[in-house]
Amino acid sequence: MNVELKNIHKHFGKTYANKGINLSIPSGTIQGILGENGAGKSTLMKILSGFIQADPGGEIILNGKPVVIHSPADAIHVGVGMLHQDPLDFPPMRVLDNFLLGRSGGLFPNRGAVAQDFKRLAEQFDFSLDPDNYVDALTVGERQQLEIIRLLWLGARVLILDEPTTGISASQKTKLFATLKKLADQGMTIIFVSHKLEDVESLCHQVAVLRAGELVGTTKPPYNTSRLVEMMFGKIVTLGERQPAKSGEPVLSLRDISLEDVRLKIRNVNLDLRAGEVIGLAGLEGSGQGMFIRACAGLVRPVGGRILLKGRDLTGRSYHTFKREGVNFLPASRLEEGLVPGLSLTDHFVLAEEPNGVFIDRAAGQRLAEERIKAFNIRGTPFSTVESLSGGNQQRAELALLQSPLSLILLEHPTRGLDIESVIYIWSKLKDRCHQDSAAILFISSDLEEILQYSDRVLVFFSGKVSAPIDAATTSVDQLGQLIGGKGWQEKGGSHA
């Protein structure tokens, strides 16, 4: 399906999110959309997919015919479906029930026929999805696969993917890319929104770059990476040199820690994490690092061993006790666990502070919000609701909520969905907090380059096994990838399930 966007404008109050964008995408094309966080990428795609409406005056033209899209139901009716960064599904429900969402027709669908359609589509793209499984048991990559075949079943001929490679493993990304190429070969139009240059360069037939709400240029292969970065930011951006920590006294000490859930057992992990040090946790999704970091936050209780924070035994104590001792946890799902949709930035900063008296001082709260917005370069106002912010600004807001003083910062995919400039900014702030408070950082990332760039040591997780700490400075991305895949463990040692 040919897609044309003509003169698309969108204002959110004083924020000018899209400024007269014109873009033409031929049928069978994988179109990359690049841009820094807050550049207007997601806004443009939400207009095309019916989640928000553009300002009057612009046009959406599909196969040469102007269409009016007021809702996601309108969009799917004309053949446009969007896969969001966080899949829009219902984790407590079964896979087949989620597959049925959005289907028009009677109240009692023929589940047998639907199950056959599901099986046919899953087999067509080599997806291993059990229709009777519950969605909360799926990885992020599997949830994406479910959403792709659901949108195809509903009739999508234009598929929009918003930052689809954040939070999925390398093997899941390979399968996703193979699926997208197959769909494009079948004549579908794929719009791939990302900040990851390597993904766009390896997948897309053409790329459009947005900056500050404007379309600043388009390009086709062969791509020039430096030129793309300059188009995105208006300047050249580099990661800079690694900055190893000057570590101090132990902050977190784990002694023979053992953890269990219904799928996984981790046994006898020992670790000393020192002030100023950063340790990265690497592994395929579901390998145990999520349970491990939550145990360090007091959210998961160990079945054996001890957790010491600056020498104090906190084993079995509550999350609130850990927090009072200076442990802060920033989860990956910003709007589900980290922030409260519907509340403004001012509300969040007021709630994060220790109460001072019985009544809330709204004026003081607004002043605090203004200070934090400026200090953390958040693109928003004290009255902006958190869901109205871009992913990068939500992440900055979470960072601005970190208490002071801190002992231990626990981060789950801290730069998920962020552009390179935001990644550098966030890590500079985190390193500052480490230095300022003599704190330590433990973080999970699916980006192996990020782990090696910002970690001093690395723990690798594989099927419940945890490696001995690995020196990040002397480890390559390839070596780390081998360990994540289960190879080379004899040399590295570590705990065993």
Image (spheres, rainbow, N blue to C red):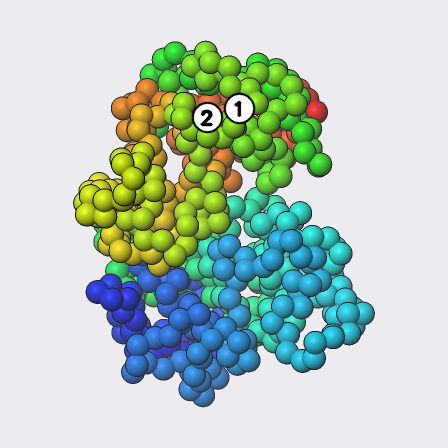
Give, as a three-letter code, the residue at label 2.
Phe
Q: What residue is at 20 percent from the left and 43 percent from the top?
A: 364
Give, as a three-letter code, the residue at label 1.
Arg
Where residue 454 appears, x then y in whole percent? 39, 30
Q: What residue is at 70 percent from the left and 76 percent from the top?
A: 107
Label 2 SS: helix
- The residue closer to the viewer here, 100 or 450, is 100
Quadrant of the image occupied by residue 441: top left
- The residue closer to the viewer here, 307 or 350, is 350
Indicate left or right for 67 with 271 as reference.
Answer: left
Q: Which residue is mark 2?
A: 322
- Examine the rendering and report whether any part of residue 224 can be seen: no
Q: Which residue is mark 1?
A: 317
Label 1 SS: loop
Q: Residues within 10 Å of mark 2 (few under 14, many from 20)?
A: many
Q: Are marks 1 and 2 in contact (CB under 8 Å)?
A: yes
